[in-house]
Image (cartoon, rainbow, N blue to C red):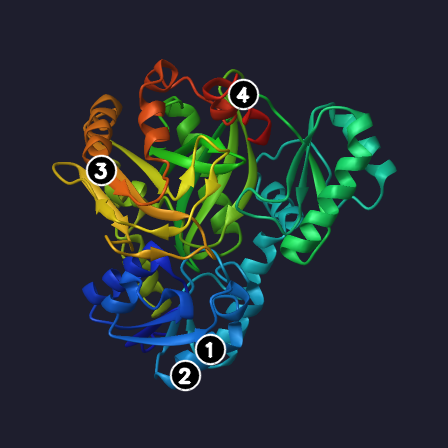
Amino acid sequence: MMKKTLKKVLIASRGEIAVRIIRACRDAGIATVQAYSEADRETAAVYMADESVCIGGPKPSESYLNGPALINAAKQTGADAVHPGYGFLSENAEFAQAVEDAGLIYIGPSPDTIRTMGDKVRARQCAQQAGVPVGSGSYNTVDSNQQAIDIANEVGYPVLIKAVAGGGGRGMRVVRSEKELEESISRARNEAEVAFGSGEVYIEKYLEKIRHIEVQIFGDGQNVLHLGDRDCSIQRRHQKLLEEGPASVLDQELQNRIRSAARQLGQSIGYRSAGTVEFIVDPQSREFYFIEMNTRIQVEHPVTEILTGVDLVGLQLSVAAGEPLSLSQEDIHLHGHAIEVRINAEDPAKAFIPCAGKIVVFQMPAGPGVRVDTHVYAGYDLPPYYDSLLAKIIVWGQNRTQAIARLKRALHETRIEGIETTLSFHQRLLSEEAFANNDVYTQFVKEKMYEKHPMRKLL
């Protein structure tokens, strides 16, 4: 592996992940350039970076999705590398290829890997070839309504229609009967075309009351290791709200099987950088199935960092510079239990509708076992153009019980005024007996917490 110069990094993302990358670069003695839109002039990352450069208007298409502008900014400021963070162009193979073609280092997987794993059908095929279990469904894209009907009849209802190019929980529809299927296929294709530029879809068997478990992997292109698992079953509209690790719903044998499967998949494709292999798990049958792989750093990566003591973003920098992995699988040990909650600018009483406006009070928690990742401060004017994430509160405890107690204390200390947030939702979630007993599933928020609420159908 050839070593490369890594002296200055352009950050092609925004929000709390931009702040996180700046901190990792500063720890490594690497200068930073924050690319920002006109709406983000006052964000914390702009103040924290060594340099900053405006790349366009407030709309994502004018700035954070404008690949040529980002690459031009990197070249003009003398950056050697580009870190895509998450969201925006972080899983766009064409952008990664353009970065490398410009003579810059892309801090992430190879463009070919991003392209392969970003295609959900090809990713399923890779998993099957690597001996990783996948759920029943279509092996290729669904090209006609009759083909969809045949597949659904074969695997049995309900089924899940998924966009081939989808991600982040978007482009998914649950169908419970043949009567719904044709209309749902048409809508799913149209939504996928608008959201991802591709109307291709495929079908999977939909399993009820399952857990969403993911495994953090890391590779240098030659060797791949896993850094444990996370339980991401608390969701709304397939978007994660709380993540914890390790996934204590798994017994040791099942945990070892899932972790080994994720590592096996990463090894089979020669994976480089941070990645997450996602599974659904049926706790009753103890079966698990691959659903997708995220070829980027995850929002919930602090859970793994706290459990393992490994700086994942720092490791991304060193591997991108051509360094081999400095860790072996035997070096990875998980200690205690960690939980992360996403404090979003959303109104949980109104179907989690996003909010924008000036943040008047912003007081984050502290104390033993508490970490906060954020880009927000009191007086910050939250723009309406981007993801609603304000902050991540991450806690650690010797066990899950202590972690929950510390999270309750942390949320009690938190004060945000000026806009609606999900703070009250998380406080309510922690009071649920089922959560305390670890008896939740991916539809728990919709079916249990809002079972009689008029917004239930929107979740």
Amino acid identity at mark 3: Thr
Vertical position of residue 313 compared to residue 407: above or below: below
Q: Tag on residue 209?
A: 4
Dot in front, 2 or 3: 3
Q: Tag on residue 71?
A: 1
Please indicate whether residue 328 sits to the left or right of residue 348 in the image.
left
Residue 309 appears in the picture as rendered: no
> Where does the image place residue 339, in percent across and percent down from the top left?
30, 34
> Where does the image place residue 270, in percent across and percent down from the top left?
49, 56
> Where does the image place residue 109, in percent across and percent down from the top left?
47, 61
Q: How many marks?
A: 4
Vertical position of residue 126 compared to residue 435: above or below: below
Discs 4, 2 touching: Cβ within 8 Å: no
> Where does the image place residue 448, in percent across and percent down from the top left?
48, 18
Dot in front, 3 or 1: 3
Quarter of the image with the N terminus is bottom left
Amino acid identity at mark 4: Lys
Vertical position of residue 243 compared to residue 450: above or below: below
First in sequence: mark 2 vs mark 3: 2
Task: Tell me what residue is drawn at x 52 percent, y 18 percent.
Answer: 451
Amino acid identity at mark 2: Lys
Tell me the quarter of the picture where residue 12 sits: bottom left
First in sequence: mark 4 vs mark 3: 4
Q: Nearer the viewer, residue 264 or 65?
A: 65
Task: Tell me what residue is drawn at x 38 percent, y 71 percent.
Answer: 35
Q: Tag on residue 414?
A: 3
